[in-house]
Amino acid sequence: MVDSVYRTRSLGVGVVGLPDQYADGKAAKVWQLYIGDTRSRTEEYKSWVLSLLRKHGVQKVLDVACGTGVDSIMLVEEGFKVVSVDASDKMLKYALKERWERRKESTFDNWVIEEANWLTLSEDVKKPGDGFDAVICLGNSFAHLPDFKGDQSDHKLALQNIASMVKPGGILIIDHRNYDYILETGQAPQGKNIYYKSDLKQDISTSVLWVNSKPHMITLDYTLELPQPEDVQTPPDTRNLLLTFSWTTLPSGPIPRTNHHQVFLIPRPI
């Protein structure tokens, strides 16, 4: 028998209607430790994102899952005009701090950072003209949105709102973990992180909540071991980050499968 309510790590609310797993600020801090230097990205990931955007002539980018700013910072440094939004003010404070510290650089001074909700995105974000050249939702972010009503209406609304920000002929990029792999094997895929050059030792424990013989929620429990000075003999300092993701099939149709991640690119018709 399963409880009807499965509590996430935090009961905070970032913006009205959208539960925020980073609301108390602790998880945001641990996540920033996990990422490490935001300018240190894997060459494979960085070259893929930049080549994809440049191939499509992208200049204006909306990052709808900014978080601490890791992807946005990379794009601002590469000369893109970026608007970054997130539902968690605790995550955004790291992006705002970076913008402030680099405000003398014109690209960072022009970087727009706002708090926004996918369910009210058109009200929260001012669309430039026909829209942005590209909208990105990276880092397994879309899976943070729970299926509140059980009919995926919130997922559909979020996707519609996100897609509405893309100009005709522009591109929308969303990625997420391969949850089919997790359900089949009972664990998150092992191997290097394609996003970050994290130097921290890490362990990821995976659990799946089943309701009525169907997968309902996946929890990833990160344990990070922080580096200690060589002359320190105390036990390693460890930090925990617990993230929960509701499990549903995305309403956008078939998604190409890869071993570790699923990535799909949706061009909006001209």
Image: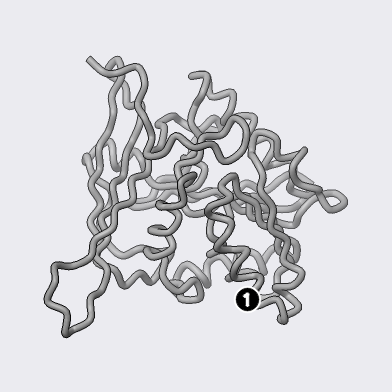
Coloring scheme of the render?
one colour
- In the rendered image, which quarter is residue 197 located in? bottom left
Residue at the image point whose x is 46% and y is 76% from the top: 40
Q: Nearer the viewer, residue 193 or 104?
A: 104
- Residue 216 visible in the displayed image: yes
Outermost residue toward the right in this view: 129
**Is 251 on the left or on the right of 105, as rendered?**
left
Residue 215 on image: x %, y %:
32, 26
Residue 194, quarter of picture: bottom left
Residue 57 in sight from this viewpoint: no
Q: Is residue 141 left or right of residue 107?
A: left
Above or below for 103 versus 208: below
Whether 235 is drawn above or below 181: the answer is below
Q: Position of residue 142 (x, y in %)?
A: 52, 42
Instruction: Provide residue 61's location: percent of width, then percent of height.
Output: 70, 59
How far across and down, in percent of the image, does residue 28 sit?
45, 55
Instruction: Name the residue tied to disc 1.
Output: 101
Q: How many marks?
A: 1
Q: Which residue corresponds to the image point at 58% horizontal and 50% vertical from the top-left?
A: 89
Image side of residue 192 versus residue 264, left or right: left
Q: Is residue 229 above or below residue 116?
A: below
Q: Quadrant of the N terminus?
A: top left
User: As shown in the figure, which amino acid type bears the numbered disc 1?
Assistant: Glu
Q: Between residue 75 and residue 101, name the one nearer to us.
A: 101
Residue 237 or residue 46, whichever sits in front? 237
**Label 1 environment density (alpha carbons within 10 Å; few <14, some 14–19, many ≥20):** few
What residue occupies the far bottom of the structure in this picture?
231
Which residue lies at the image location 46% right of the left edge and 72% below the top edge?
A: 41
